[in-house]
Image: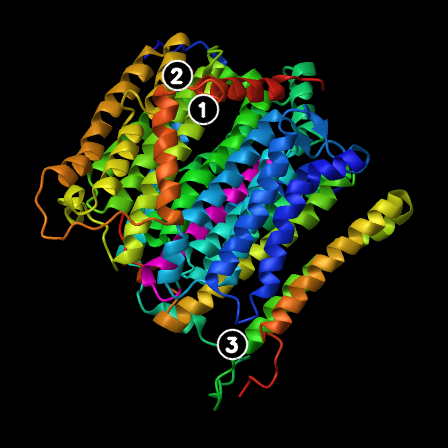
Amino acid sequence: MIEDILLALPLAIVVLGAIVLMLISHFPTVSLKKYNLIAVFFLVCAFILKLTQLDDSNHIYLFEPLFNKMFVIDTFSNLFDLLFLAGAIVTLLINTHYFQERDYYNGEFFSLLLFSVFGMMMLSHANELVTAFISLEIASISVYILVGYNKNSLKSSEAMLTYIVLGALSSTFFILGTALIYGVVGSTFIGDIYSFIQNNPTKEITMLIVALMFIMVTILFKIGAVPFHSWVIDVYQGAPYPITMFMAATFKIAVFAIFLRLYLIDFTHFYDIFSKILQVVAVVTLIGGSWLAISQNNLKRMLAGSSIVHAGYLLIALSSIGLGAEFAAPAIVFYLMSYFLSAVGAFGILSFIAAQRRRRATFDDFKGFSQERPYLAAMMTIFMLSLAGFPSTIGFLAKFYIFLSAIESGQIFLAGLGITVAFISIYYYFKLIALMYFYPTDEEPKKFPFGISSSVIFLMALLTIWGGVGTGWIPFLPGVDTLVETAKEAINSISVKPY
Amino acid sequence: MEITLNHYLVLSTILFAIGLIGVMRRKNLLMLFFATEILLNSVNIGFAAISHYYGDLTGQMFAFFIIAIAASEVAVGLGLLVLWYKRNGSIDLDMMSTMKG
Amino acid sequence: MEHYDVANPYFGVFLLFVITFGAFYATTILARLASRALAAKDTEKIKLSIYECGPEVTKQPNRISTQFYLFALLFLLFDVEIVFMFPWAINFKLLGWFGFVEMLMFILLLAIGFVYAWKKGALEWHNIK
């Protein structure tokens, strides 16, 4: 019992932080900086605690006599927890400047962000479909509110309305699928569903496939795969910068956490059909996302479009899991980590600049940026290169593993398409780099602004490069190999099937 | 006629279809939230019926949780709707056209 | 792309999925176009107007404050949460002390939410004019 409480402590700390922030938001004397510090303090506490628990907890059910396998703690969920916590911490630190420049932030903002992180952490631990649904809703409802946080902006409210209507609609499919599964199997535990299909290979199989398809619809909606992508660009544009960053980098990873767990266990017997569906979805997502990203003039919208493309790469890897690529699942985890680093950095620079000027978002505004702020421009270049998958950045390795697994599973067409799309993506990423370096500017050169925001962005840039080249250079620091090993270990920890 | 599990499931499916049509056809945002409620509650009927069929109380507990989630989702949605109405004087979906992606 | 095996029984399901998808999109687009062309545009206002059993609606001199709406919403939320206490009460003996502590924590969380709403001024009557 005591050990279980210790294992649940990081979750409890995050909720406690959210409640504390909610309660002190009444005091007008507390400044935004203090709210931010308190939020970061709680998140860092949870992060450190989680870090100490990363190794010693392999497949433990939390409070098993009472919760009955609803919450599982394994390396997979711990790794994702660390990612969410890191995502929230980095989002808050990078945007310290931005929060102070805007007048609509208050204590509740940080409280909601922490609640959302709590929902995501629950999602990665959920071993039961209704628990997964509830935690998904905790995370999404908080994000709905955060998207519309700027009440003065018409765009922000409209983005929130679009998101909440479509999001509520899509999440009903998840619960419908759960109801169908409950009807067939009589239980909603992920392991029970697996063993039911194992023991009764023919009973009500169509119903189960339909149910899993419904669940997949919700997940594809949340990650913004193409048939369900209509909200992505508008919502990303309408949301405030910190939230765009949070959604693109952290929320997407959270949805993949539950998708991977489900896909590796419950979908096992239907890989032949779901791989085909995922192949089709991946193809349209890659093509549609590229088209959307190319046709945008606004940088935030371009990054939103490119986030659809990145979801497409991940879908390729998912479909290769079913076709027998052994390394595909760890490749997804690794890709998520690399995308997290580069996307957080790119959005971070955008919000850092947006904090100082009222608006600097289109491509044209970045003309000659390298003369005005050479260091920021260099970092932006690094992030763009990593997003495009340029060698010697972490993004290259991630894409390399994905395409390798696609080829290993015999999906030559998909691998080829992925590489083509990666080359197309060079167009819109390098457009920004070219604009920054090859155009003159009227602006005066500015000094490098030392502060929390810029140093965190610098750290992200360093990690992006170091993840691409630095493996094995420095004897005591873990390199990329460690990341890959951790990803493999994480996947192994859910593939263990003691049901 | 005895009412069996199938009847409940058919009812649940019909309600779900009604909700889906509502979401697709309605332009009024309030009606959209109504339709979402219908969707979630149709699933609730399914859960309760299946739970009775198996003689297992878990399904009814799920229904409670879904009710709570539906309530919070709609509370957030309606809260925003009031804000939107104060600003625009309309809750018609066609009014949302500042962004076209 | 690899060659799809038509004899595979799942291929039919897959085909169905694709066709349903196409049909779904076609119908939504058609429905949108048709409703845009056919629908009477100005009915929404009458549809939404207050209907009081036949007699004409008397215009209220003062508009109803949104505060009432806030009360209703808060009532709804706290009312719904009570539902979780019934199963707990039924299984009280089974769950024992741990269940009791857990329920206390749940109520504590609810109370915190209540305090928040109170402090935020959501329950102030004198705001209504």
- Asked if the stretch drawn in magenta spans residue A167, the answer is yes
Badge 3 amino acid: Thr
Q: Nearer the viewer, residue A28 or C34?
A: A28
Residue at mark 2: chain: A
Toward the viewer: A120 or A264?
A120
Please tell me which residue lies in front, A359 or C69: A359
Q: Amino acid at mark 1?
A: Phe
Name the N-terminal-most of marks 2 and 1.
1
Residue A498 x, y percent position in the rendering: 71, 18
| Chief SS of the magenta region | helix
Q: Is residue A303 visible?
A: yes
For label 1, the SS is: helix
Locate the N terminus of chain A and report the quarter of the image it occupies: top right
Mark 2 element type: helix
Report, in whole angstroms, how far the alpha carbon at label 2 lies from the one at label 3.
56 Å
Q: Is residue A65 left or right of residue A281?
A: right
Q: Is residue A402 above or below residue B82?
A: above
3D distance between C-alphas at marks 2 and 1 = 9 Å
Q: Are marks 2 and 1 in contact (CB under 8 Å)?
A: yes
Residues in magenta, as a range: A151-179
* Residue A401: assigned label: 2
**Disc 1 target residue:** A334
Q: Are marks 1 and 3 on the same chain?
A: no
Quadrant showing the C terminus of chain A: top right
Residue topped by disc 3 = C66
Q: Mark 3, chain letter?
A: C
